[in-house]
Image (tube, grey):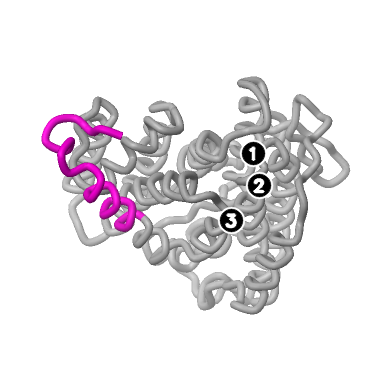
Amino acid sequence: MVLPGFLRETDEALARADAQHCESITRAHARTFALASSFLPPRKRRGAFAVYAFCRLADDIVDRAEERDQSLRTAELDLYRAGVADALSGRPEGPVFRELWRCVQDFHVPAGVLEELLNGVARDLQPAHYATWADLTGYCEGVASSVGSMCTYIFGVRGDEEVRERAVRYARTLGVAMQLTNILRDVGEDAARGRCYLPDADLETFGLSGERVLHDPTLKDDPRWRKLMRHEVARARALYRAASPGIALLSPDAQRCARACADGYAAILGAIERNGYDSFSVRARVGNLARAGLLWSVWRSGAERPPLDANGPSIEWGEQVLSRAEEMILCD
């Protein structure tokens, strides 16, 4: 691959260094994803590391933000947007943007999903507040479903564009499930940053409030909190089940990676339960032995059977079977 301008003569050595830089970011911050990526062929693994590094740096701009003025954060994110725009126009600067450019060229990742991720991250520049599950889903779509779309392009699919469109729908559902898992795991950490992502409607249903989440350390001992968390964990599991059939639509050489990511993240829900739903003083983690067992199980698995429901994913919630659009409205 030839990069524009001065990069042409040094591309091979520079590309190796850029790829190693993105890999180091991934391995430092995403244990589950880094382990799952071992199931990918090198070309796709490199692309996955590139998009992870891109997403991570964007997220870090916001998550380091508590110490800085909001105008400075906004300016830094705007500068990052400009760097993405330069990369997409063939003028990448720095290892992450160069790798992102190579990834977009190699796998035809749409610029729109990169913009969607940046718009989603930008929402965290303001205090988090979501009135309903539908509102929170919009946030999850921006910061996580966008990543599912990117990965679908990198992983490839077993078929034509229609199959890819179906695979993207499932991947975006998986993104919502994973982001909800993040939210349930990180309640305490987010509260320390002044953020409460749990929807007001859900909290009120169980006699709770966002103010208590933010300011009351005894909330973890309230039986109503445990009931709320059981409700949300059940919702997350319903989303994982709905997304699961879509993995079979992916190229065979990427299915194990996707399965390991999905199952590895879903296992965090069990850790939350084992912690008594205390996401304030304890961070739910999947132990090394459990993680190794999960990876072994994925490795032994064969090719998955494509879903029969061409209009999926369908979400089983209680006694209902819902589409994604219906689930956003009816699960409150």
Looking at the image, can residue 307 be seen? yes
Q: Please name the residue shown 76% across and 46% down the image.
A: 303
| Whether label 2 touches label 1, CB < 8 Å | yes
Look at the image and say whether residue 310 sits in the magenta stretch. Answer: no
Give the number of the disc on residue 39: 3
Q: Which label's residue is closer to the chain start, 2 or 3?
A: 3
- Structural crowding at the residue carrying mark 2, measured as other residues with C-alpha within 10 Å and reported as few (<14), some (14–19) or many (≥20): many
Between 222 and 115, the residue placed more toward the observer is 115
- Disc 2 to disc 3, C-alpha distance: 8 Å
Residue named by callout 2: 255
Q: Please name the residue shown 56% across and 70% down the image.
A: 279
Task: Say if 275 sits above or below 53 in the image.
Answer: below
- Structural crowding at the residue carrying mark 3, measured as other residues with C-alpha within 10 Å and reported as few (<14), some (14–19) or many (≥20): many
> What's drawn in magenta, residue-wise?
1-22
Name which residue type carries label 1: Ser
Task: Say if 10 sits above or below 203 in the image.
Answer: above
Residue named by callout 1: 251
Can you say which quadrant of the picture contains the N terminus?
Answer: top left
- Disc 2 to disc 1, C-alpha distance: 6 Å
